[in-house]
């Protein structure tokens, strides 16, 4: 029974040669968000917005062509400094699910911290992830952050 184990929290960090305003914009604006998140899933995009308290969904088309992903709320948004996403469940083939065992496995936080020094930004990502997805997330985030760095430094 894995339901009672606390989720592991993963930590990723990258230094980007750009001011934090630029890193923030690259990370969150639709056109560039779609580019760096391709590392996880081609066609990844956001429905909703990043305002504090807002509902937001992280979606991509699955094998059937229907949208699947995460349903969440922006818990904190301190512009250019910190964003905290509270994952509430999943979207499965277009249907929001916050009550099934599968959905509850994903309830947790994903935080982005932007720290600038001498024109360089350290972006730190901390996220709770179900144990069986740790390896996949480690691969995905390392590729995604490399892509984000490349785009933000242009």
Image (spheres, grey):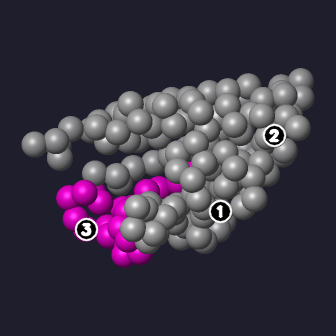
Residue 24 position, x and y percent, is: 76, 47
- The N terminus is located in which quarter? top left
Q: Which residue is mark 1?
A: 50
Which residue is identified by label 3?
99
Q: For residue 64, which quarter of the picture?
A: bottom left
User: Quick check: can you spot residue 20?
Assistant: no
* Residue found farthest to the left: 1
At x 71%, y 39%, the residue is 148
Q: Is residue 143 above or below residue 79?
A: above
Q: Quadrant of residue 102?
A: bottom left
Asked whether 98 falls inside the magenta stretch, the response is yes
Disc 2 versus disc 3: nearer the observer: 2
Closer to the camera in the image, 120 or 45: 45
> In this picture, which residue range is highlighted in magenta?
84-104
Per the image, is 148 magenta? no
Q: Which residue is mark 2?
A: 152
């Amino acid at each position: 029974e894995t339901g009672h184990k606390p989720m592991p929290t993963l930590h990723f960090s990258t230094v980007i040669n750009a001011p934090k305003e630029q890193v923030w914009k690259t990370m969150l604006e639709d056109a560039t968000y779609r580019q760096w998140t391709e590392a996880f899933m081609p066609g990844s995009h956001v429905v909703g917005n990043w305002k504090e308290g807002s509902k937001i969904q992280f979606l991509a088309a699955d094998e059937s062509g229907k949208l699947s992903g995460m349903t969440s709320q922006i818990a904190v948004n301190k512009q250019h400094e910190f964003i905290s996403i509270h994952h509430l469940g999943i979207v499965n083939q277009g249907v929001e699910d916050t009550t099934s065992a599968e959905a509850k496995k994903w309830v947790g936080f994903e935080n982005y911290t932007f720290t600038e020094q001498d024109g360089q930004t350290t972006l730190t990502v901390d996220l709770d992830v179900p144990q069986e997805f740790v390896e996949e997330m480690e691969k995905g985030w390392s590729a995604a952050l490399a892509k984000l760095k490349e785009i933000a430094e242009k």
